[in-house]
């Protein structure tokens, strides 16, 4: 039984990385000034940020049904089954669309509502590849990913409220007040959606808030005080130097966490938060792969 793993580019996995990891990545589309761009194909992060800061009209979209089934059909020429891992259903309708499309594939395509995005979604896809190598079929892998979907947490510090205001997620008055007070909002993603978590006056306070929050989740939800049972990562939007410093701070707080990779947040999140952000993710290691 040959099982292929598919994620979308909201996972942060590039096309090149997907080839090295032994999986497939469906590029997510963006509408910019009425023209469609595909993340990692016809739109780089640098190009996206350049257009964003220059106030181009940017909105997220979902892959067309034809692009999804076209990829599946091509994969099934070589593989027996597919595990498709889209971004969280609470953040996009692409999961519901894929689930509907899979009904025509007689059980050969298993769509997992994994409730994840960015690095946590990336790790689900990497774990799924490892489970497939152990000989599990698509349905068995899907059951494990569904059972462990909430074993992850994300906290994000924003540098600006401009893009939340632009997207209608906060009122202009709230954005103006937050800008005047120089607030650094901390948001969280816990499965279903992007939510407000806390407010800080300085970057230092915001980072302390995120460290405390992720430490609480790791201990209370994952039974892990030191990082030995979790995989940590730092994500950012055009904030590489600060991300390096933040990763070093996290290493002090969680000495057994091992390597803490640094990467950029996917463009679907960047659309709503803009440049200058910092984020930390913690994902519990999968017990099925620990032995």
Image (cartoon, rainbow, N blue to C red):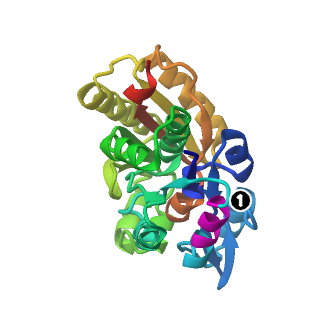
Residue that protrudes farthest toward the bottom in the picture: 34
Write down the residue under mark 1: 40
Residue that protrudes farthest toward the front in the picture: 1
Residue 74 painted magenta = yes
The residue under the point 54% across, 62% down is 268
Left or right: where 232 falls relative to 147: right
Above/below status of 161 relative to 64:
above
* SS class, disc 1: loop
Above/below status of 129 relative to 42:
above
The answer to which quarter of the image holds residue 17 is: top right
The residue under the point 54% across, 30% down is 246
Left or right: where 29 falls relative to 91: right
The answer to which quarter of the image holds residue 289 is: top left
Closer-to-camera residue (60/72): 72
Closer-to-camera residue (102/191): 102
Residue 274 rendering spot, x and y as whole percentages = 56, 59
Residue 146 painted magenta = no
């Amino acid at each position: 039984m040959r099982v292929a793993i598919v994620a979308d580019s909201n996972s942060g996995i590039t096309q090149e990385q997907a080839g090295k990891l032994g999986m497939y990545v469906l590029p997510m589309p963006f509408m910019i000034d009425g023209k469609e761009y595909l993340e990692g194909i016809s739109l780089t992060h640098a190009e996206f940020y350049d257009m964003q800061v220059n106030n181009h009209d940017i909105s997220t979209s979902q892959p067309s049904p034809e692009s999804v089934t076209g990829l599946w059909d091509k994969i099934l020429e070589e593989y027996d089954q597919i595990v498709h891992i889209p971004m969280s259903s609470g953040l996009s309708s692409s999961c519901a669309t894929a689930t509907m499309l899979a009904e025509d594939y007689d059980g050969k395509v298993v769509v997992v509502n994994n409730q994840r995005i960015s690095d946590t979604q990336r790790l689900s896809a990497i774990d799924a590849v490892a489970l497939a190598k152990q000989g599990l079929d698509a349905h068995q892998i899907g059951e494990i990913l569904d059972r462990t979907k909430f074993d992850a947490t994300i906290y994000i510090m924003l540098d600006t409220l401009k893009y939340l205001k632009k997207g209608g997620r906060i009122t202009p008055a709230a954005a103006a007040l937050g800008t005047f007070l120089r607030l650094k909002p901390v948001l969280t993603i816990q499965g279903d959606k992007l939510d407000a978590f806390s407010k800080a006056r300085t970057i230092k306070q915001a980072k302390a808030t995120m460290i405390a929050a992720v430490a609480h989740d790791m201990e209370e939800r994952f039974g892990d005080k030191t990082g030995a049972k979790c995989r940590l990562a730092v994500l950012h939007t055009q904030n590489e130097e600060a991300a390096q410093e933040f990763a070093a701070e996290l290493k002090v707080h969680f000495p057994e966490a091992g390597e803490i990779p640094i990467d950029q947040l996917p463009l679907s999140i960047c659309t709503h938060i803009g440049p200058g952000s910092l984020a930390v993710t913690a994902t519990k290691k999968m017990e099925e792969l620990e032995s």
